[in-house]
Amino acid sequence: MPAVQEAERLALAAGARRALILTIPLPAHTPLMEHAAAAFRKAVDRLQFKPPTFPILANASGEAMRTVGALQDELRQQMLRQVDWARTMVSMKTMKVRTVVELGPGRVLASLAAKHIPDVVTWNADELFVDFADTATA
């Protein structure tokens, strides 16, 4: 039995209410991304960061990052670490976040935020796109 199916079986046997195998095109946020992560770390190391003017939540911990060093460390490791979405949602509630914009394709994360943060307004970046070359949308 493949490891993912075995993990699903064990979770259900241990009393999980539900276990769902997600179909994703790559092993994101796992050590299997090490080769790509090494190249990404080199790119991050070449960037010049400015101190953030507002807190940015870390994928792995859900904690607010407020320094250049914290941002660089998080970016260097983010392809390899698991995402702690629950802690991120707690941090967003504590910070009284009222608007969430999802930058990737789709609305999965924005929809999850809407379920966990009362009265939050959610958007996908594609929904905010304005094509200034198109006079109908400009």
Image (cartoon, helix red, strand yellow):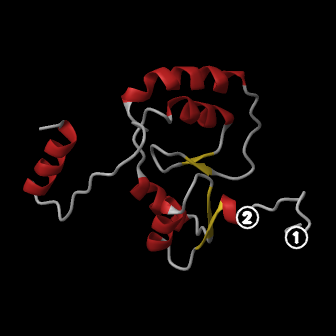
Dot 2: within a 10 Å radius of its alpha carbon, few (fewer than 14), some, or many (20 or more) residues? Answer: few
- Residue visible at 81% across and 62% down in the picture: 130
Q: Which residue is mark 1?
A: 136
Front-most of residues 79 and 130: 130
Between discs 2 and 1, the one toward the N terminus: 2
Q: Is residue 14 left or right of residue 32?
A: left
Rendered-image quadrant of the N terminus: top left
Q: Are marks 2 and 1 in contact (CB under 8 Å)?
A: no
Q: Which residue is mark 2?
A: 128
Rendered-image quadrant of the C terminus: bottom right
Dot 1: within a 10 Å radius of its alpha carbon, few (fewer than 14), some, or many (20 or more) residues? Answer: few
Residue 16 got which mark?
Answer: none
- Residue visible at 20% across and 62% down in the picture: 18
Mark 1 lies on a secondary structure that is loop
The answer to whether 12 is drawn above or below residue 80 in the figure is below
Of circles 2 and 1, which is in front? 1
The answer to whether 56 is drawn above or below residue 96 in the figure is above
Percent of width and height locating residue 49 = 74, 33
Mark 2 lies on a secondary structure that is helix
- Residue visible at 17% across and 37% down in the picture: 2
The type of residue carrying mark 1 is Ala
Q: Is residue 91 left or right of residue 100?
A: left
- The residue most toward the bottom is 119
Percent of width and height locating residue 5 = 17, 45
Percent of width and height locating residue 35 = 47, 20
The answer to whether 29 is drawn above or below residue 97 in the figure is above
- Residue visible at 83% across and 59% down in the picture: 131
